[in-house]
Image (cartoon, grey):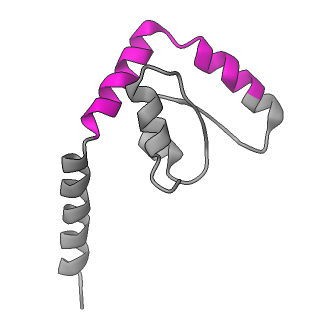
Amino acid sequence: EGYGLPLLEAMASGTPVLASDRGACPEVAAGHAVIVDPLDVEAMAAGIGAALALSAERRAAALAHARARTWAETARGTLAVWREAMSERP
């Protein structure tokens, strides 16, 4: 999945998240998930433990982060990027 909706959906439901360090995952998670190399089995195993051990405060922060990522906010951000890109035309 290209944008990271499963990460946000998990966070929005209060589920701890273990995510890959590839693609959009680190940016979407914004520090609210445990990020690991998906090719490193030991890192993934340790990451599962770390995700399950996240404090209530970190889970609450992840929940707030996910709830702030609305479709309206996504549209505003996308429009801003398009406007910026169009203003830089030669």
Instruction: Answer left or right for 82 relative to 36.
Output: left
Pick the quarter of the image with the C terminus: bottom left
Q: Eyeballing the image, is 90 above or below 50?
A: below
Q: What residue is drawn where x is 43% and y is 17%?
A: 59
Query: x, y (%) of residue 51?
Result: 59, 20
> Compared to 65, does 37 lie above or below?
below
Residue sitting at x 47%, y 46%: 4
Residue at 41% over, 23% down: 13
Q: Nearer the viewer, residue 36 or 66?
A: 66
Q: Is residue 10 depicted above or below 74 in this figure?
A: above
**63 sits left or right of 31 in the view:** left
Q: Residue furthest right?
A: 41
State the extent of the magenta-drawn residues as a range: 45-69
Looking at the picture, how far across and down is residue 24, in whole percent? 49, 51
Of the pair 21 and 64, the residue shown nearer to us = 64
- Residue 7 place in picture, x, y as percent: 48, 37
Between 32 and 69, the residue placed more toward the observer is 69
Does residue 30 appear in the picture of this structure?
no
> Dominant secondary structure of the magenta stretch?
helix
Residue 82 in sight: yes
Is-magenta flag for residue 50?
Answer: yes
